[in-house]
Image (cartoon, helix red, strand yellow):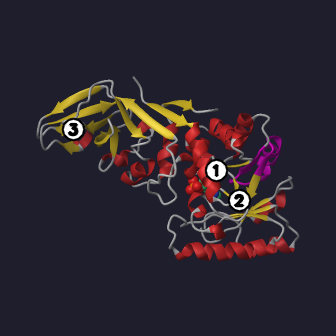
């Protein structure tokens, strides 16, 4: 009797199709860093390759090496956001990985085939400044792809988006022959101007909405379920769990589930979040390391009944909001301990 993480690869393919339609002809380059947002970069990338994806982004060198093995003989460019250092050149080359060049030094030491330049347009996280890009251009550096990343694309009305777009266009003017990539999931839905030649969706592929609220165009890819192990009756006034997280105000029934934050369910969701049982929400009573309780007062619930913690009813963006986090974090945590099962063509 264990919790189970089901990864629905058909839902992944569906979401890929939704993003492709929205991207209006731009190449879809899936971002599958952190082991495919915790869902398994190998199976995810193989299915997306079958759907037509030929460029993948990862964060770390090790993720790139693992992905190259997982893709086997399939042809695909793998771009590593972490870039290059002198010590990693030979490993990048050996696995045919392309570093995303984010400093002038990196642009100078990388002599490999594909050259990808990350320009900072106002997120202040990584990438060369516009001035540095200018210097690179004047010394004859010619990237094949110029990319940048938006910091507030989830908020369409935020003026930061237009400001970043303008700076990105200024960077592109320095490298007229390069392809361009700016939008992640949220950016795809800002407007056509933001899509350029390539878009880099991550969370949308896995069912997260571009506006951080559930979006019915996308299907749930991660389904987390657990069977009830025990029903416990509480009397009014009973104190529950560590530090008496919860005190029953009335007589009630709680169902105990065999998973916890060690399996990736964010502990901070316990005050506002809910799991789903029989098509209706059952709010969390506590989330501890190995056990979760949900309120099943006046519900027909018995040991063995399946409870959905994430999926079609328990929406990813709702859980993220309840936890005070983002869908991305909710997903990447899931990889930890739970048995992972793949369904759909793969
Ligand atoms: C993570 C990341 C993405 C994907 O973002 P989503 O919000 O998951 O679509 C795209 N580009 C860069 C540079 C990233 O770091």
User: Label 3, on which residue?
Assistant: 240
Pointer 1 or 3: first along the chain = 1
Distance from disc 1 to disc 3, alpha carbons, whole Å, reads: 41 Å
User: Label 1, on which residue?
Assistant: 31
Q: Quadrant of residue 121?
A: bottom right
Q: Nearer the viewer, residue 127 or 340?
A: 340
Q: Quadrant of residue 144?
A: bottom right
User: Is 203 drawn above or below residue 129 in the view shown?
Assistant: above
Q: Is mark 2 within 8 Å of ligand 1?
A: no
Pointer 3 or 2: first along the chain = 2
Is 196 situated left or right of 232 in this image?
right
Label 2 environment density (alpha carbons within 10 Å; few <14, some 14–19, many ≥20): few
User: Is 346 drawn above or below residue 155 in the view shown?
Assistant: above
Pointer 2 or 1: first along the chain = 2
The mark closer to the camera, 1 or 3, is: 1
Q: Is residue 231 magenta?
A: no
The mark closer to the camera, 3 or 2, is: 2
Query: Looking at the image, which residue is at 56% across and 45% down?
Result: 37
User: Is 176 drawn above or below residue 68 in the view shown?
Assistant: below
Secondary structure at numbered mark 1: loop
The quadrant in which the C terminus is found is top right
Query: Looking at the image, which residue is at 66% across and 50% down?
Result: 30
Asked if residue 42 can be seen in this view, the reply is yes
Secondary structure at numbered mark 3: strand
Q: Is mark 1 within 8 Å of ligand 1?
A: yes
Q: Is residue 85 magenta?
A: yes
User: Label 2, on which residue?
Assistant: 25
User: Residue 192 at x, y = what percent?
Assistant: 64, 68
């Amino acid at each position: 009797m264990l919790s189970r993480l089901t990864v629905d690869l058909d839902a992944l393919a569906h979401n890929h199709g939704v993003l492709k339609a929205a991207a209006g002809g731009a190449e879809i380059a899936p971002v599958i860093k952190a082991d495919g947002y915790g869902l398994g970069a190998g199976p995810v990338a193989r299915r997306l390759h079958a759907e037509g994806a030929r460029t993948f982004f990862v964060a770390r060198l090790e993720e790139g090496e693992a992905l190259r093995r997982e893709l086997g003989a399939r042809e695909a460019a793998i771009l590593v956001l972490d870039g290059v250092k002198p010590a990693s050149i030979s490993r990048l080359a050996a696995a045919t990985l392309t570093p995303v060049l984010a400093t002038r030094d990196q642009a100078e030491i990388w002599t490999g085939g594909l050259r990808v330049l990350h320009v900072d347009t106002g997120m202040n996280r990584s990438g060369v400044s516009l001035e540095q890009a200018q210097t690179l251009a004047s010394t004859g550096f010619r990237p094949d792809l110029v990319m940048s990343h938006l910091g507030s694309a989830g908020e369409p009305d935020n003026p930061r988006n237009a400001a970043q777009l303008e700076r990105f266009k200024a960077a592109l003017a320095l490298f007229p022959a390069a392809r361009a990539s700016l939008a992640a999931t949220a950016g795809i839905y800002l407007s056509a101007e933001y899509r350029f030649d390539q878009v880099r969706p991550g969370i949308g592929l896995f069912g997260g909405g571009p506006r951080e609220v559930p979006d019915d165009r996308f299907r749930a890819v991660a389904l987390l379920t657990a069977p009830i192990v025990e029903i416990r009756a509480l009397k009014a006034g009973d104190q529950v769990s560590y530090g008496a997280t919860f005190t029953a105000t009335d007589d009630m029934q709680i169902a105990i589930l065999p998973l916890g934050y060690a399996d990736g369910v964010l502990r901070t969701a316990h005050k506002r979040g809910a799991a789903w049982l029989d098509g209706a929400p059952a709010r969390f009573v506590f989330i501890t390391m190995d056990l979760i309780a949900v309120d099943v007062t006046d519900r027909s619930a018995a040991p063995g009944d399946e409870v959905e913690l994430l999926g079609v009813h328990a929406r990813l963006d709702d859980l993220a909001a309840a936890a005070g986090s983002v869908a991305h974090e909710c997903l990447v945590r899931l990889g930890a301990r739970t048995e992972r099962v793949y369904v759909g063509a793969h």
